[in-house]
């Protein structure tokens, strides 16, 4: 089979060269489309449920919210771990699924279970499933800086202007707003006035809830026109809130303003964000969608922030203090430099050992071509370009040239010393030289590939770290073997047709 492959390549030289160009172009396109990140995503398929319970102690949250949710989630197929963390007014339930489980299928299962549980939870509970992201999804962090603006004003700017704009960036799962204070209308009941009016806390709450909405009242026909009738009751300012009627006493309305102090307050906070130990700050945290290209997400976020900056109030500055792109550049850049340095060193060594620079360059062509084939296979297997996968390519550089060196050296030796080389066509001589070493070369490469196969059996965290390394090496070695038996013999023949300039002619002249 190997002899037929070599024979086909030498007899269809133009086809092989064109196919090589096509593969190179496809490999370059695959490289441009590869997701780029600093590290491989080692997290399992995970679904988080976050519920808020204002005013509840951790013990109450655990017994009334966390336990019912955990019991409801028991028995979901492919579940691996179910755990929860309860804090004051907050519960975080995490469900880990087996590796390979479709993320959206898992979320659908959790959503179905959670939907049937909502009615049995205490009133006033809010929350649900967390965004479609991973524990490594934090990609961009910034603070809102503005002299003269309060924490509440900066938080409002982040919540209502910056956050909605950033959520439109492709690859962004959500933008968390942290720190600062959230403005709210605050009603502080006066117990004496409420007792004198005979109003209970429940009546006060129900009156506010019932008078904070807009309702439609049908249509009114007026000739050829139809008028829409609606009642506007939504609270827009403190005076609207004070004017709400709670009850009637002796024919006179008793309003909220008669029973309580109405003022601008803040929503209860569960923590703060400090900056450089100097004071509180307002922070925006961009979460990337699971599987998104980290570099593209960060570029999109930065571009959107640049577009927003001129529209923000004067003096407002967005100070970026964490950017995943810088980490990606450092990690990938370190491996890229290692690849470049190793390639130059290999070419120099090949020139010294083969005794001819042109021969060394011809053999070295295997390096970029094998790398491009590797990128195609990485794209096909859904792998990302990161420190581990590109590190595997750097490890394999020396091994990628083994087959090509043996093939070229045997071709040169045949053309220079074989007494029948001058009597037979050069194409036939090259074919015989490649056929002689095809089986040993293939056996050697397969043995090296076999050495890395045990790494492919690793599971969980170890597998997510080292399987990309092993796969990259296997892909690169398989590509180099294919190139050594097809492209390298064709290049040898094509170069040998131009005496004085070809690799083989120059090498033979030295002999």
Image (cartoon, grey):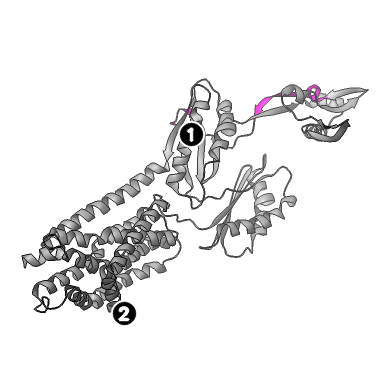
- Crowdedness near tag 1: few (<14), some (14–19) or many (≥20) residues, C-alpha within 10 Å: some
Residue that badge 1 annotates: 305
Q: Position of residue 120 (x, y in %)?
A: 74, 52
Q: Is residue 279 magenta?
A: yes
> Above or below — where is 272 with respect to 472?
above
On screen, residue 140 versus residue 414, left or right, reads right
User: Which mark is nearer the camera, 2 or 1?
Assistant: 2
- Which circle marks residue 484 in the picture? none
Q: Position of residue 89 (x, y in %)?
A: 64, 42
| Residue found farthest to the right | 250
Q: Position of residue 182 (x, y in %)?
A: 61, 31
Q: Residue at x 43, y 61 (%)?
A: 380
Q: Is residue 95 magenta?
A: no
Q: Residue at x 72, y 49 (%)?
A: 121
> Above or below — where is 258 with respect to 229?
above
The image shows a total of numbered marks equal to: 2
Residue that badge 2 annotates: 1
Query: Would you say the residues marked 2 and 1 are in contact, meaning their CB atoms lie under 8 Å apart?
Result: no
On the image, which quarter does residue 218 sit in? top right
Label 1: state its secondary structure: helix
- Crowdedness near tag 2: few (<14), some (14–19) or many (≥20) residues, C-alpha within 10 Å: few
- One can see residue 508 in this view: yes
**Quadrant of the image containing the N terminus:** bottom left
Q: How far apart are the alpha carbons under marks 2 and 1?
A: 59 Å
> Above or below — where is 494 with respect to 64?
below
Label 2: state its secondary structure: loop
Magenta-colored span: 255-281
């Amino acid at each position: 089979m190997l002899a037929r492959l070599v024979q086909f390549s030498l007899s269809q030289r133009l086809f092989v060269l064109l196919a090589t160009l096509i593969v190179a172009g496809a490999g370059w396109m695959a490289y441009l489309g590869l997701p780029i990140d600093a590290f491989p995503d080692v997290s399992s398929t995970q679904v988080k449920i976050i519920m808020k319970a204002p005013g509840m102690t951790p013990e109450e949250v655990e017994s009334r919210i966390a336990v019912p949710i955990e019991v409801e989630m028991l028995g979901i197929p492919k579940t691996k771990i179910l755990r929860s963390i309860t804090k004051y007014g907050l519960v975080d339930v995490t469900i880990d699924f087996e590796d390979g489980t479709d993320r959206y299928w898992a979320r659908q299962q959790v959503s179905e279970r959670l939907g049937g549980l909502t009615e049995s939870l205490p009133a006033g509970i809010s929350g649900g499933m967390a965004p479609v992201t991973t524990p490594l999804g934090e990609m961009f962090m910034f603070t809102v800086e503005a002299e003269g603006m309060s924490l509440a004003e900066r938080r409002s700017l982040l919540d209502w202007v910056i956050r909605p704009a950033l959520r439109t960036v492709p690859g962004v799962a959500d933008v968390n707003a942290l720190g600062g204070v959230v403005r709210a209308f605050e009603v502080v009941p006066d117990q004496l006035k409420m007792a004198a009016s005979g109003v209970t806390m429940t009546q006060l709450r129900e009156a506010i809830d019932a008078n904070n909405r807009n309702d439609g009242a049908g249509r009114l026909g007026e000739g050829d026109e139809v008028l829409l009738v609606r009642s506007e009751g939504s609270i827009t300012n403190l005076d609207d809130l004070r004017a709400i009627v709670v009850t009637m006493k002796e024919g006179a309305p008793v309003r909220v303003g008669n029973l309580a102090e109405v003022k601008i307050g803040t929503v209860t906070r569960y923590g703060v964000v400090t900056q450089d130990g100097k004071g509180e700050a307002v922070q925006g945290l961009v979460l990337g969608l699971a599987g998104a290209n980290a570099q593209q997400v960060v570029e999109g976020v930065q571009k959107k922030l640049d577009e927003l900056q001129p529209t923000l109030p004067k003096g407002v500055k967005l100070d970026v203090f964490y950017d995943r792109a810088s980490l990606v550049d450092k990690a990938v850049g370190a491996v890229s430099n290692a690849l470049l340095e190793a390639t130059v060193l290999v070419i120099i060594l090949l020139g010294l050992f083969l005794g001819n620079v042109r021969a060394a360059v011809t053999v070295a062509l295997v390096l970029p071509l094998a790398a491009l084939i590797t990128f195609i296979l990485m794209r096909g297997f859904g792998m990302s370009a990161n420190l581990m996968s590109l590190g595997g390519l750097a490890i394999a550089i020396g091994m990628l040239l083994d087959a090509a060196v043996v093939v070229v050296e045997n071709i040169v030796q045949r053309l220079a010393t074989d007494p029948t080389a001058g009597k037979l066509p050069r194409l036939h001589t090259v074919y015989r030289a490649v056929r002689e070493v095809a089986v040993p070369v293939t056996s050697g490469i397969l043995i090296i590939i076999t050495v890395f196969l045990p790494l492919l059996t690793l599971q969980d965290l170890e597998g997510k770290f080292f399987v990309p390394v092993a796969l990259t090496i296997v892909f690169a070695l398989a590509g180099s073997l294919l190139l050594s038996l097809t492209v390298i013999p064709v290049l040898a023949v094509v170069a040998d047709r131009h005496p004085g300039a070809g690799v083989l002619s120059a090498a033979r002249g030295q002999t």
